[in-house]
């Protein structure tokens, strides 16, 4: 069932930040099926990321909004498919995670993250 992680779950996930996402364990179902997606927004002076960390088994998830800094994703399959309608998809977490699971199985996720050139 699609539902946000609670505070305790997020603390458990936070303790696994040093691990690659594929090695992290879901605090709800205990499976090693964590997945991660970043969507870049340009509404501010510098790029930001909408981040979704979710479990491919039980669809518990955590979303966050962070500055991208000098990191950038080299592809965004959700943006490529939905374009301007991407905000509709973000409003429906069950739909969003089902779509993202499809990208994961197709090898379009996880995204490759690169460093933005300084001054670029
Ligand atoms: Zn789970």
Image: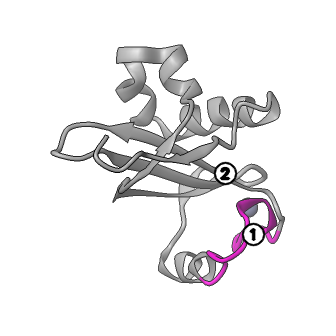
Q: Nearer the viewer, residue 5 or 1?
A: 5
Is the residue 54 above or below the residue 90 in the image?
below
CA gap between label 2 and label 1 equals: 14 Å
Which residues are the magenta region?
15-30
Which mark is drawn over residue 59? 2
Which mark is drawn over residue 84? none
Badge 1 is on which residue?
Answer: 24
SS at mark 1 in the image: loop
The residue positioned 73% from the left and 65% from the top of the image is 20
Q: Nearer the viewer, residue 12 or 92?
A: 12
Q: Nearer the viewer, residue 120 or 65?
A: 120
Is the residue 35 above or below the residue 90 in the image?
below
Q: What count of labels does the image hold?
A: 2
Whether disc 2's CB lies below 8 Å from ligand 1 is answered yes
Where is residue 66? Give x, y as percent: 35, 58
Q: Residues within 10 Å of mark 2 (few under 14, many from 20)?
A: many
Where is residue 3? Give x, y as percent: 55, 56
């Amino acid at each position: 069932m699609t539902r946000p992680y609670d505070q305790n779950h997020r603390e458990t996930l936070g303790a696994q930040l040093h691990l690659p996402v594929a090695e992290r364990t879901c605090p709800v179902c205990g499976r090693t099926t964590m997945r991660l997606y970043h969507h870049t927004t340009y509404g501010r002076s510098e790029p930001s990321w909408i981040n979704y960390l979710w479990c491919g088994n039980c669809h518990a998830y955590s979303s966050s909004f962070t500055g991208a800094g000098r990191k950038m994703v080299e592809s965004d399959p959700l943006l490529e498919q939905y374009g301007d309608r991407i905000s509709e998809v973000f409003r429906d977490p069950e739909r969003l995670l089902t779509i993202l699971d499809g990208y994961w199985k197709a090898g379009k996720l996880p995204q490759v993250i690169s460093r933005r050139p300084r001054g670029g």
